[in-house]
Amino acid sequence: MYDTQLWKGTHITPRALPGMGECTLVIGSLSKSHAMTGSRIGWVVGPEDAIQRMGDLMTNTTYGVPGFVQEAACFALTQDAAFEARIAEPFRRRRDLVLAQVARQNVVRAIPADGAMYIMLDIRATGLSGEAFATKLLDTHHVAVMPGESFGEAAAGHVRVALTVADDRLEAAVAQLLDLARTCAL
């Protein structure tokens, strides 16, 4: 989903690797690359047998995509790479803004953010779990982040920040997050 939003390196589909074309499913979506989040339209490329079985599954789990979303998808697919780059650019810029803020303090650490529209922050120095920190941040500053525990045990003690609001709102929210982290770490 994030192949057009990599900030470091180049995306290589596993299907392009020798011998992987017949044993790999690649799932794509217009959600991130064409700013159609929530429209729930995408595709799967893979071995014919697997695709046929997925068709049976889809028939039983989905009833269809609304016509206007299909029309928007058709339009989106006629756009070029420059369109996708315009969609991705604000997320890169906002990632850089957050990284700059985090670099100016020593309580919260940013996990390398090489792509996507989110950034994971390590808040373990606060002594709080990701869930406790997220709840406290919401209760005290009305800033919502996703607790790392939502993504499994390896992400415990972290929070995920979505880079989906205007730059000034994001900077203000991250400033409040960092202030709370500093206060908790004292």
Image (tube, helix red, strand yellow):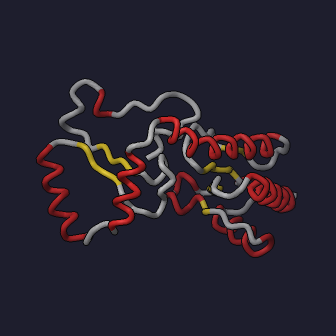
Residue furthest toward the bottom? 139
The residue sitting at 48% across, 46% down in the picture is 33
Residue at the top extreme of this rendering: 18
Q: Quadrant of the C terminus?
A: bottom right
Please state the total of marks drawn on the protein image. Answer: 0
Q: Residue at (63%, 46%) from the top-left corner? A: 91
- x and y percentages locating residue 76 in the rendered image: 42, 49
Relative to 11, residue 179 above or below: below
Q: Residue at x 60, y 51 (%)?
A: 118
Q: Position of 65 compared to 118: left or right?
A: left
Residue 59 in view in this figure: yes
Judge left or right: residue 15 versus residue 81.
left
Answer above or below: position of 111 versus 133. Answer: above
Give the image quarter of residue 31: bottom left
- What residue do we see at 71% from left, 40% from top? 96
Foreground: 121 or 60?
60
Task: Compare residues 48 and 74 and report the one nearer the observer.
Answer: 74
In the image: residue 83, left or right of residue 118? left
In percent of width and height, residue 173 lies at 77, 60
Instruction: Find residue 55 and report its horizontal and vertical position in percent.
Output: 17, 59
Q: Nearer the viewer, residue 103 or 117?
A: 117
Is residue 179 found left or right of 26 in the rendered image? right
Q: Is residue 185 visible?
A: no
Give the x, y percent position of residue 114. Answer: 58, 37
Foreground residue among 107 and 65: 65
With respect to residue 89, does 40 lie above or below?
below
